[in-house]
């Protein structure tokens, strides 16, 4: 019998070595290498009994060399998940053979969203839900509480990957959920479930199974305290699509953001509301983010951000106050902290407003995270409004990127953003000159600016 080979994997970064050493050369961590067996007769026997003999490489069955021009470009058939917001984030729906990783904080609604999706899909095709963290009774009680159709959905409570694959080979599901990848394990690996080696190898085996059987696999992943997906970084490289379900404890709204997608656009955003009967889609997200106070206040302004394939109107609030300490505070929620510091420097240099003795607080209402530069001009306008205690009109929308030399740079899809603001009743927009629409928009006054000084003059008069 062939001797089983061993490898040593770092629990911090996932790097592997042929022999043990005190320090990981990749990340510098000490005493983080753990031994696990690459293969064993027991594992080989189980995999051989439950899988195809062509299982080579986690991307599926390997093929011979082929010219790129000869590759079949047939359309990949997608099918709906039952929720249009979920489909939007996935790029149009689920793809056969695709592997989707869904992460989120405890209580965000990952299991609820997937249970709703699987109950709906089970009415059209074969579906299997594998739970390793809850009993079947707990899942059944949740489905009953949410009023979901439970007929035809196959349930399995198991954490051993080889056993799961053996059952899947018999049931042959079109869609399969693994809840969660952190509790799955392989017998040939000696480390505990949730370790780097177990998560990596379990995900690799499940990904191979998905590619070769054209089964759509949905993996639930835990997150760390920082909000990033737990486990080795290679886990995100293995999957086809990685999405993150976010939501604050004091809000009933949840945002599903695409972080990686091989079949569609990234940074796509889907919005759900957590109700008594589960997660429900929000068809018009701008309506919930624009629930502004009836009494106008200084420092409040509306901007238009681009999330994936659609514009989104979001309120931005700023508060500028005298600093009681020698080091003024810069606090942001949903906005990049370093970018705010840069914008304040540009405001001083090219706008003549000094905030070095002021505390500046910036908040994006609704829990949205702004990841693009189109909010630069709106952030500066909100800061100036709060500093001067000057209320801005409720029907004003501002967008544009601000450069270090004080120029206002154009933003992508500028005309679509302006049109979206006009649909929601905004009457005036201050935008980069290059983004001005070629044809006038009925009921909307668009002011194009090229410099920061021009923009402040147009906004505040």
Image (cartoon, rainbow, N blue to C red):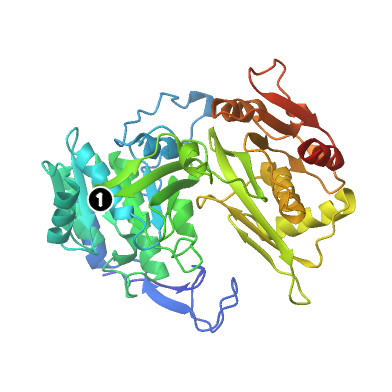
| Image quadrant in which the C terminus is located | top right
Question: Relative to the observer, which residue lies in front, 442 or 254?
Answer: 442
| x 83%, y 42%: residue | 452
| x 36%, y 69%: residue | 194
Residue identified by numbered label 1: 276
Query: Residue 379 in the image: x percent, y percent?
Result: 70, 49
| Image quadrant in which the N terminus is located | bottom left
For residue 62, above or below residue 335: above
User: For residue 456, which quarter of the picture?
Assistant: top right
In-image side of 202 versus 434 (left or right): left
User: For residue 455, which quarter of the picture?
Assistant: top right
Question: Relative to the observer, which residue lies in front, 94 or 193?
Answer: 94
For residue 319, above or below residue 78: below
For residue 194, above or below residue 165: below
In-image side of 6 versus 359 (left or right): left
Query: Residue 217 in the image: x percent, y percent?
Result: 31, 46
Question: Relative to the observer, which residue lies in front, 247 or 460?
Answer: 460
């Amino acid at each position: 019998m062939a001797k089983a080979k061993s490898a040593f994997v770092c629990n911090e970064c996932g790097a592997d070595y042929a022999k043990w050493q005190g320090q990981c050369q990749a990340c510098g961590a000490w005493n983080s290498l753990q031994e696990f067996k690459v293969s064993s007769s027991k594992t080989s026997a189980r995999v051989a009994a439950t899988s195809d003999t062509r299982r080579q490489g986690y991307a599926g069955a390997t093929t011979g060399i082929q010219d790129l021009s000869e590759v079949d470009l047939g359309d990949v058939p997608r099918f709906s998940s039952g929720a249009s917001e979920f489909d939007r984030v996935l790029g149009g729906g689920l793809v056969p053979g695709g592997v989707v990783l869904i992460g989120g904080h405890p209580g965000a609604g990952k299991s609820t969203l997937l249970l709703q999706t699987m109950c709906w899909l089970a009415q059209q095709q074969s579906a299997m839900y594998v739970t390793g963290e809850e009993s079947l009774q707990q899942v059944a009680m949740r489905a009953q509480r949410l009023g979901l159709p439970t007929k035809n959905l196959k349930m399995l409570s198991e954490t051993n990957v080889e056993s799961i694959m053996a059952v899947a080979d018999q049931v042959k599901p079109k869609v399969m959920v693994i809840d969660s990848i952190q509790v799955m394990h392989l017998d040939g690996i000696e480390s505990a479930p949730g370790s780097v080696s177990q998560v990596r190898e379990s995900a690799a085996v499940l990904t191979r199974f998905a590619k070769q059987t054209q089964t759509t696999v949905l993996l639930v992943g835990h997150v760390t305290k920082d909000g990033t997906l737990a486990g080795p970084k290679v886990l995100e490289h293995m999957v086809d699509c990685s999405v993150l379900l976010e939501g604050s404890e004091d809000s009933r709204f949840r945002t599903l953001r695409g972080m990686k997608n091989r079949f569609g656009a990234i940074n796509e955003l889907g919005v759900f509301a957590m109700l008594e009967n589960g997660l429900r889609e929000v068809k018009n997200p701008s309506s919930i983010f624009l629930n502004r106070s009836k009494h106008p206040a200084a420092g409040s302004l509306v901007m238009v951000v681009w999330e994936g394939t659609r514009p989104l109107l979001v309120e931005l609030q700023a508060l500028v106050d005298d600093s009681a300490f020698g080091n003024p505070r810069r606090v942001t929620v949903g906005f990049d902290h370093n970018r705010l510091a840069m914008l304040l420097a540009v405001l001083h240099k090219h706008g003549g407003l000094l905030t070095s003795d002021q505390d500046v607080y910036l908040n994006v209402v609704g829990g949205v995270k702004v990841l693009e530069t189109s909010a630069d001009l709106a952030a500066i306008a909100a800061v100036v409004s709060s500093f001067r205690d000057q209320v801005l009109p409720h029907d004003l929308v501002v967008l544009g990127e601000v450069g270090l030399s004080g120029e206002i740079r154009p933003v992508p899809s500028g005309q679509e953003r302006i049109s979206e603001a006009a649909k929601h009743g905004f009457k005036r927009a201050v935008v980069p000159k290059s983004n001005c629409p070629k044809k006038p928009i009925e009921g909307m006054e668009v002011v194009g600016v090229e410099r920061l000084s021009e923009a402040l003059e147009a906004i505040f008069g």
